Image: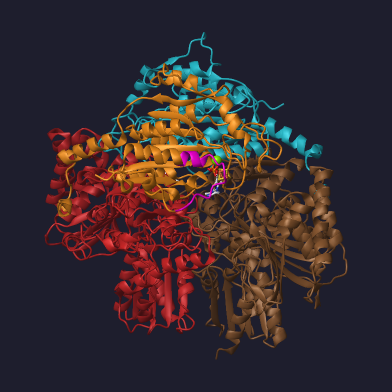
Chain colours: A cyan, B orange, C brown, D red
Amino acid sequence: MKKYTVKDYKSKTKPIWCPGCGNYGILNALYRALEQLQIPTHKIGIISGIGCAGRLPGYMGTYGFNGVHGRVLPVATGAKMANLDNTIIAVGGDGDGYSIGAGHIGHAARKNIDITYIVSDNGIYGLTKGQASPTTPLGIPTKTTYYGNIGATFNPIRTLIAYKASFVARIFSADIKHSTDIIAKAITHRGFSFVEVLSPCVTFRGKDQYDYFREKSFYIPESYDPSNEVNAFDYANDEDVLELGIIYKKSRPTYDEALEEVRTKAKNGGVSSKLGLLNNFEV
Amino acid sequence: MKKYTVKDYKSKTKPIWCPGCGNYGILNALYRALEQLQIPTHKIGIISGIGCAGRLPGYMGTYGFNGVHGRVLPVATGAKMANLDNTIIAVGGDGDGYSIGAGHIGHAARKNIDITYIVSDNGIYGLTKGQASPTTPLGIPTKTTYYGNIGATFNPIRTLIAYKASFVARIFSADIKHSTDIIAKAITHRGFSFVEVLSPCVTFRGKDQYDYFREKSFYIPESYDPSNEVNAFDYANDEDVLELGIIYKKSRPTYDEALEEVRTKAKNGGVSSKLGLLNNFEV
Amino acid sequence: MSRNNIVIGIAGSGGDGIITAGELLVQAASSDGLFVFMLKSYGPQIRGGESSIKLRMSEIPIASQGDKLDVLVVLNWKDFLRFKSELLLEDNVVIVSDSDDKFPEEDIPIDKNKMKKWYKIPITEIAKESSGTKQSKNIVTLGIISELFNLPKEALKRSIKKKFSNKGQKVVDSNIIALNAGQNHVKNSLTKIDPLEFEYKEHEPRLVMEGNEAIAYGAIYAGLDFFAGYPITPSSEIMQWIGRFLPKYGGTIMQMEDELASINAIIGASFVGKKSMTATSGPGISLMNEGIGLASMTELPVVIVNVQRGGPSTGLPTKTEQSDLMQAIWGSHGDSPRVVIAPADVEDCFDSTVLAFYIAEKYQMPVILLSDGFIGHRKESINPAHLKDKKYGFKKINSRKTPTKEELKDYKRFKITKDGISPISYPGIEGGEHQTAGIEHDEYGYPSSDVDVHKKMTLKRYAKYEAIKKDFSFERFYGPDDAEIGVIAWGSTKGAVKEAVKKANEKGIKVQAIIPQIIYPFLMEPFKKFLKNKKKVIIVEMSYSGQFTRYLRGFINFGKHGVTTFPYRITGGAPFTVEEILNKITEAAEKK
Amino acid sequence: MSRNNIVIGIAGSGGDGIITAGELLVQAASSDGLFVFMLKSYGPQIRGGESSIKLRMSEIPIASQGDKLDVLVVLNWKDFLRFKSELLLEDNVVIVSDSDDKFPEEDIPIDKNKMKKWYKIPITEIAKESSGTKQSKNIVTLGIISELFNLPKEALKRSIKKKFSNKGQKVVDSNIIALNAGQNHVKNSLTKIDPLEFEYKEHEPRLVMEGNEAIAYGAIYAGLDFFAGYPITPSSEIMQWIGRFLPKYGGTIMQMEDELASINAIIGASFVGKKSMTATSGPGISLMNEGIGLASMTELPVVIVNVQRGGPSTGLPTKTEQSDLMQAIWGSHGDSPRVVIAPADVEDCFDSTVLAFYIAEKYQMPVILLSDGFIGHRKESINPAHLKDKKYGFKKINSRKTPTKEELKDYKRFKITKDGISPISYPGIEGGEHQTAGIEHDEYGYPSSDVDVHKKMTLKRYAKYEAIKKDFSFERFYGPDDAEIGVIAWGSTKGAVKEAVKKANEKGIKVQAIIPQIIYPFLMEPFKKFLKNKKKVIIVEMSYSGQFTRYLRGFINFGKHGVTTFPYRITGGAPFTVEEILNKITEAAEKK
Ligand SMILES: Cc1ncc(C[n+]2csc(CCOP(=O)(O)OP(=O)(O)O)c2C)c(N)n1
Ligand SMILES: Cc1ncc(C[n+]2csc(CCOP(=O)(O)OP(=O)(O)O)c2C)c(N)n1
Ligand code: SF4
Ligand code: SF4
Ligand SMILES: [Mg+2]
Ligand SMILES: [Mg+2]
């Protein structure tokens, strides 16, 4: 059998992200996680919306889909549900996911669609050159908040737990080893896996963002039990510190499993073909 | 000063909801809450999207806006933020709010827009005649789930807490007195107030839905402290029972307050009118 | 007077079971091999409101609902009033009404001098007496009219048995009793004085369907793999039928959170190589326009059904209109090619859906199927034999061209070809890995903002139109080629136009109609043929802003063809009548 | 050769400060009263990619960017190559390049025989030596070219001082040193042999703006109360400028979660009586179509700006195109009237925005302002005096008609009137309580699905078009009325068309152009006047599918007017050149 290396997961295109951008870390961790899991390149679909992070599929030697802003999860849902043979990974920015795409996460999560969703969260709109996002800290001036950002920030981890996502984790793009490990676990997890990435935008949030993330974050200790959603919710208080690792995880039936039951019911005469017409459709 | 009565809050149109529909209870509670608060009819805007619940503004003697499916909160946000003099109340169904409108709640909540949002949650699409909604229980057959509903349900209370809504309550449309009280409190609350209503759809969920809600729900005891979001999150476990009353409440600055600060900064020379051109705009 | 073609209207309250009565009659008539055509209409209430049906049955093929009623049945006069503009009466109409309905006679807007006969029958009373409940009013009514007008009696009995069998023998029996009671009342207590008598021979049973149902079947027939949608009137039944049947064939159906999700989910499914579809109505399309543009740019096959309703905005959800035409063609930003197809009747819904998949898969682009509430919700006979003999049959729609081994060596997903069609690979195909993007890209799929690349790729995407224009023609002409008067119409307007053209020619006005199925890209050839002898052309459409007229003028220089156009554009709500169109033809004929 | 009209191009890497150099030069030129026109262009990278500017400055008014460069400045040849189709060269171009850039000479695509002069100057070295950092390359370059070609030297110094003053005296000084170093290098070490010399007299300082900036100012001038938007290239600057200035005037600005929210928020704001606006580009409009239809149905004034970019889908975000025209007109489902206005240059952005508010408020409907990336992002001189003297001035736009006391007695929000305009009340007005709905409704606003109500209300909504057609005319004709050759164009195409028409007439080809500002509804009167003497008409547009052509044909029966049309439709990316259009005019003139 073919052995896949990091090189196989790379495309011929060189990333055009700014030097120092957090997305490089995510990309590298993803290469390594896939190598670790040895998933054939032609059985992977990397789906994205629009944003700096959304350029990632173009740098993959797998199948990639770079759609429109905010719709990464619907595309990924369709791609997964239409052919369960493939590994589908959705990637995108905080604007793409938490702002314009906010309506989709809850539904992919509660249905437990068996995909992995990686959000490159830099707390800014990178591609459009520096406007506020739902995770831009209070008070910060951006292109659209000339006098400082107002309105409380969005808490992705707590929200995803409330949405009943079955795997909720956070990583820091600067730690490629840890990120590789968590991404691999997320891909392996059966059901909807969510990975929030602290990913600095050196251009529009400044280089300090690395320090900021480093100072605020800590690794979840081994002793932590991620299976209780109330504890996990409590843990993910963003006014405090940023936990790195798997914050919540609990297995439950996936949507494809439930749909398979539906098909069985339908085939077992659950429905009679009213007009005889449908006989024509049998192969 | 004019004294407003329930009659003033009624329009000339007779509701066309099915006999026994939960929306009648919501409507009556709203009439009474407004009477209790004595808000002038011409300073109220009731905003809705589309659905059976969305017909409510038409039955009000106030200003009403019946827009498109799922956009009740953006319309209400614009209506409130453009003129703070008015009391803005958004109403809609579970499909309108939790399905197609899901992307807006988190943002109205985190920004703490000073409006009240009442969701008539019947766990079904009423107006379109009986398809599954995000709160339709598992296993139930509906027009779109012929073989039974699949996928976990959406938990509105937990989600709204994760969204940082500053007022989160649940009522049962059959208890008009309690509902009146909570709605009045929600309107009075400064900031984003969310009221989830257990509101039976007798036509597409059957009359049993009254019993089901009655059995599952209980009134929150006086001793309960709604100010802690972790406790509140824990409390709102929908696999358990349905709490009636204020589940979470905490005051924090509203978006209009924050914007007022921005205006002050801008006026205090925070920005120089680069081209002299803007002088022309001064009145 | 005996006849083999009759139009019946029934109106009453929601609780009266009007719709059930209509459906039973339709069922009965078609099992006896008659052609049927039935419209339903409701008030705004979900329950307890008014409702009505208009049912035409005939031994010979029919294309429209029939303009006016030969028979009007009223269970409640107040409710009838709401439908009076939809239920127009022939001068010599026969009326059957419930004498237990105490509505003041002077308020009933009927010209009593003209009507042939008014039977006032204690329907409620008969119901209560026979079956013990007034709930069986509708069945009693069926008994009455089947006896009065000789409608399919035995078949009606069979339909009732079939319909209620799953509710137990008791329910079946009590309904049969009610039917008999109605029939007996006529036989025993009435003097039948009107000469109206329906007469027909039995034929092979026919299939009856609603347009939405036919689209669902057509899609499954064409090999649909994946459906994602969001409910909306008047399209929801498509998803509902598919939800019942598709899982049987191993396919996947998902109710999504909204239309943005639906269109993007089917794009995702198409990306992994599957035949996919969504269905919605105007408001949903307005939300899908970005996604449709994405499918156009990524050259992914998807079928989007729009069952049009009255607009704009929420508009008239339960009423029909043809005012989403321009949006179907131009709704997305940018130059974003797509194909627009319009079914013209229920049978054509099946055909057009199959065709839509064929085109989508072959040319790798979004295809919009533009139906409307009139077709979607009406019941109409279709020819079962016809369905078996499709040009593009099930499983034969493997028209998606995948790359050869040779092509995979240096795989260009968006390879520039003469017909614009590039071999498409998808996850699962080794060596075909690539990125598909909504951003402009080169032949490999790499993003590019180069002006020349954009030009080349735009031309490539539009080259498909030329291929389609070559590959397809259509032959839906009615009337003689040498007519100087023409009618151009589209979609559900076909029925009334077809019958009006027939009548006009019978009356001696030579006129020909053309009803395209592929609306966009514009196929000029058939129109050239059509316009050859025309001097005056009536353009019929249910859009006040005249979208079809503007569209046609954009592509046909009528002035150059020496043709004067007579746009006939009305606001939506009620379907065209044959008479309206006939009048326009006559007017045009008389104009100097 | 001395001249008062020059086109300069500068290309280099992102770090080279090309854009800053261009902006300083623009600033300098306009403070000396010159007319300027500057385009910026970037590669796909956010940082460190290539960038270029094309700058025209002139003592006499100019309408376009100028086709070809008189002067090309290259800091990096590799980067220049990416722009070679945007930076075309005059045959006798003068080139200035950095001799420190070691790109192989044979790969430089320049015809060395034709060019006038190629100065290779060690720009990097001069920068390092003078200011100690190569970062000042751009300022050194300004020094060099200002000295070489006599560009506004003193003004440049002022601009530099102003620009860097907030960074401290040290930064200012070191930049002035760099400027001097560039100038001194030319004076001391170069033999200036080309005769190209810019010459002008000083005039009153001019204002320079980008189109997006002008729209922001226009909106505030018109009394904007509420803005809601979502960032998108190339429109974001509108929101950004408004975000800086509107709070000063007490207005409200909100960045929403998406475009669905933006359009609905401004509808909400309009519902409470406020002037409101949003701005986006194609993908955003595709999402707003449902909301635009809602504004149309609820008859609420809103202004929607679309700064068009290349499509379809994500397309070419940073490039211009005119392919959202049909979407602006027909993008929403249903017959949903709206007004479409297209600004034709930067100054017109201001005017059109004011007009958009005037029309929206007066006729109570959505107005789409269709700008594009070419206008939005270019810098152009405008006449400050002109801005002070607006037809529809600030605070004068109180055109929203509210109900009188009398009308409030039995208030009908959607009262049927001759011009379709009904007095509008909003929260705060006692006695004007009503429901506004996106569902069809009667005059009071009560929902209705009655066919006749729908008809009446549709006609009412469309009656506004007749009123608008009566109230407005436009006078943007260029060239003699009696010309037999015509050019029809819209929006940003104006500049090149205007200059081409002028040149053609100078060359003896009689030609006239018409550039509408109100695009939809279609104002026939000016076109009638225009077409009177025309035999051949060129339709110029940047849309491959020919949207403008189709649109015009939908409303003008060219055949009947005896006019042959010559559609000239190109894919987007690079703005039209004067020469391209001149060629088309010549071709048309020669065609039999
Ligand atoms: C419908 C639509 N709206 C807006 C845009 C413009 N846009 C592109 S990317 C982006 C946001 C980028 O921010 P984020 O998602 O956080 O990604 P990042 O660039 O920071 O990785 C926006 C607003 C668009 N392409 N489409
Ligand atoms: C964009 C759009 N999609 C779909 C619809 C159809 N539609 C109208 S109401 C509704 C859902 C109704 O359910 P809910 O919001 O729960 O309200 P209820 O009727 O149960 O009160 C749907 C899908 C629509 N009007 N617009
Ligand atoms: S702008 Fe920010 S997010 Fe985008 S590539 Fe640069 S550093 Fe990365
Ligand atoms: S369908 Fe259900 S929600 Fe709608 S009016 Fe009837 S009972 Fe109420
Ligand atoms: Mg971001
Ligand atoms: Mg509901």
Note whether residue C526 is visible: no
Report which quarter residue D360 is drawn in: bottom left
Question: Does residue D271 belong to the magenta stretch?
Answer: no
Relative to the observer, which residue lies in front, D373 or C556? C556
Considering the image in quadrants, where does the N terminus of chain D appear? Answer: bottom left
Residue C550 is situated, as x and y percent measured from the top left of the image, at 51, 71
Q: Quadrant of ligand 6?
A: top right
For this view, does B173 lie left or right of residue C483? left
Image point 58% across, 85% down: which residue? C587
Relative to the observer, which residue lies in front, D425 or B217? B217
Residue C370 is situated, as x and y percent measured from the top left of the image, at 61, 60
- Our reading of the magenta stretch's main secondary structure is loop
Image point 16% across, 46% down: which residue? D159
Relative to the observer, which residue lies in front, D98 or B60? B60
Q: Is residue C525 above or below residue B45?
A: below
Q: Which span is picked out in magenta?
A: B13-27
Q: Is residue C581 above or below residue D305?
A: below
For this view, does D21 lie left or right of residue A262? left
